[in-house]
Image (cartoon, rainbow, N blue to C red):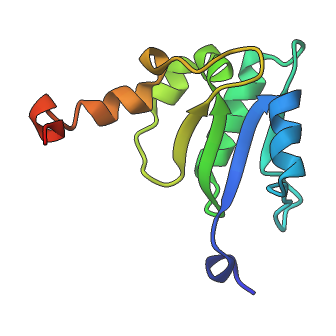
Amino acid sequence: MTQAAKGKLIAIIGDEDTSVGFLLGGIGELNKQRQPNFFVVNKNTAVSEIEDAFKAFCKRDDIGIILISQNIAEMIRYVVDSYHQTIPTVLEIPSKDHPYDATKDSILRRAKGMFSSEDFRA
């Protein structure tokens, strides 16, 4: 079955707990080049490695959504903010130790900028 027929993958960039949770949920995959669709970040992970993983996921045509823990997105904010493609879609998510903060989510800020407050009135 071709990748287009199967659909696109969800990629995850997160701490160990977040990543393992999604992997236990069944999102873990390896493509034909044996590249995983997940990247686990720990205290020894260099920012450049996170940046490289994010850019690599953005370039893959088999990935439709990139989930990234918001605290990790903050570490590479300049890269996340410069990403403007629709697919793969980038979603910032909370992690066990870092709650979600909507004010830091650049994608949400960009989406809110597309609408006026009058669009939300009934």
**Residue furthest out toward the front:** 122
Q: Write down the quadrant of residue 90 in the picture.
A: top right
Of residues 89 and 79, the one nearer the viewer is 89
**Residue furthest out toward the left:** 118
Of residues 43 and 114, the one nearer the viewer is 114
Residue depicted at x 62% and y 31%: 93
Looking at the rendered image, the quarter that the C terminus falls into is: top left
Of residues 29 and 94, the one nearer the viewer is 94
Left or right, residue 50 beside residue 67: right
Left or right, residue 82 beside residue 98: left
Residue depicted at x 80% and y 44%: 38
Q: Up-down: is 23 above or below 82?
A: below
Q: Write down the quadrant of residue 12 in the picture.
A: top right
Looking at the rendered image, the quarter that the N terminus falls into is: bottom right
Query: Horizontal and vertical percent for residue 52?
Result: 70, 33
Query: Horizontal and vertical percent for residue 39?
Result: 81, 37
User: How many labels, in total?
Assistant: 0
Left or right, residue 44 beside residue 27: right
